[in-house]
Amino acid sequence: MGNKPVVVREEREEVFLKLVPPVDRTYLRWLMRDLNRIHRFTPKNTRPVKPPDHYIEYMHWNGWLDVNLDDPDLAHLFK
């Protein structure tokens, strides 16, 4: 019984270097423009989608759908 001796572990400090080959500035500008166009895309005039009735029924059975889709307060969301 008694106290166990404390084990002191020395941690080595490691430095990781990331070396990147030179990249053409024109290619980099094109790539950034393309990525901005893809990731900032937001569709306009989207229409709400009502899932098929058998999906809704399945979700009700499993307790995944706690919202009544026939609620008049929510009707404007599903038009």
Image (cartoon, helix red, strand yellow):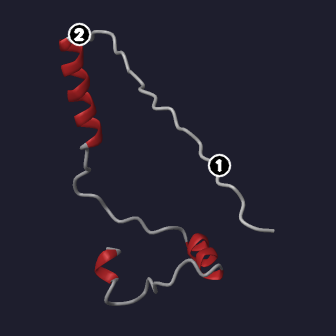
Percent x, y of residue 76: 28, 79
On the image, numbered disc 1 is attached to which residue? 7
Residue sitting at the far bottom: 72
Label ID, residue 24: 2
Q: Residue at x 54, y 68 (%)?
A: 52
Q: Amino acid at mark 2?
A: Asp
Write down the quadrant of residue 47 in the picture. bottom left
Neighbourhood count class around disc 2 (C-alpha, 10 Å): few under 14, some 14–19, many 20 upward: few
Rendered-image quadrant of the C terminus: bottom left
Residue that lies at the very extreme toward the front in this rendered image? 2
Q: Is residue 75 left or right of residue 57?
A: left
Q: Secondary structure at mark 1?
A: loop
Residue in the foreground of this view, choosing between 48 and 62? 62
Identify whether 17 is placed above or below 43. Answer: above
In this image, 35 relative to 61: left or right? left
Q: In percent of the image, x 36 and y 15: which residue is there?
A: 19
Q: Quadrant of residue 56?
A: bottom right
